[in-house]
Amino acid sequence: MEIEVTDENFEQEVIKKSEITPVLVDFWAEWCGPCKVLKPVLEKIAAEYNGKFILAKAETDKCEKESENYGVMSIPAVKLFKGGKVIDEFVGAQPEAKIKEWLGQKL
């Protein structure tokens, strides 16, 4: 499952939902090359994990307040929310195997 999040719906779509199902938030921007590389990798993993987590796409231009709240300094920035809090994160495009290994330790 993939959802688009903004400052307006972040609380509901990320914080609240992460109390039931982990939410992986990808902070990205249209102009960001590495973001375009990471996007299909995250989408493929989300499809393979079939509901074990929710993939939330947070375009930094539409999610400025939450990007600032969570200390996003460079993108892509990926943060895993569980129980309403960030439990881990990484920055930059990562290979699929590395992301799966990282997720395997967290989910």
Image (spheres, rainbow, N blue to C red):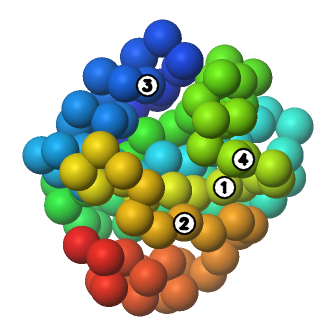
Q: Earlier in the sequence, mark 4 or mark 3?
A: 3
> Could you tell me residue 26's position as x and y percent?
56, 48
Type of amino acid under label 1 = Ala
Q: Which residue is mark 1?
A: 77
Marks 1 and 2 in Cβ contact (< 8 Å): yes
Type of amino acid under label 3 = Phe
Marks 4 and 3 in Cβ contact (< 8 Å): no
At horizontal 44% and vertical 82% (from top left) the residue drawn is: 102
Q: CA distance from mark 1 to mark 4?
A: 7 Å
Type of amino acid under label 4 = Val
Which part of the image, by quadrant, shows the C terminus? Answer: bottom left
Q: CA distance from mark 1 to mark 2?
A: 7 Å
Q: Which residue is mark 2?
A: 89
Q: Quadrant of residue 70?
A: top right
Secondary structure of residue under mark 4: loop
Type of amino acid under label 2 = Glu
Q: Earlier in the sequence, mark 1 or mark 4?
A: 4
Q: Earlier in the sequence, mark 2 or mark 3?
A: 3
> Could you tell me residue 106's position as x and y percent?
31, 76
Secondary structure of residue under mark 2: strand
Q: Which residue is mark 4?
A: 72
Answer left or right for 66 relative to 85.
right
Q: Earlier in the sequence, mark 1 or mark 2?
A: 1
Q: CA distance from mark 4 to mark 3?
A: 15 Å
Marks 1 and 4 in Cβ contact (< 8 Å): yes
Of all residues shown, which one is farthest toward the top? 8
> Could you tell me residue 46's position as x and y percent?
34, 58
Q: Which residue is mark 3?
A: 10
Residue 36 in sight: no
At horizontal 87% and vertical 37% (from top left) the residue drawn is: 31
Secondary structure of residue under mark 1: strand
Q: Is residue 29 above or below residue 98?
A: above
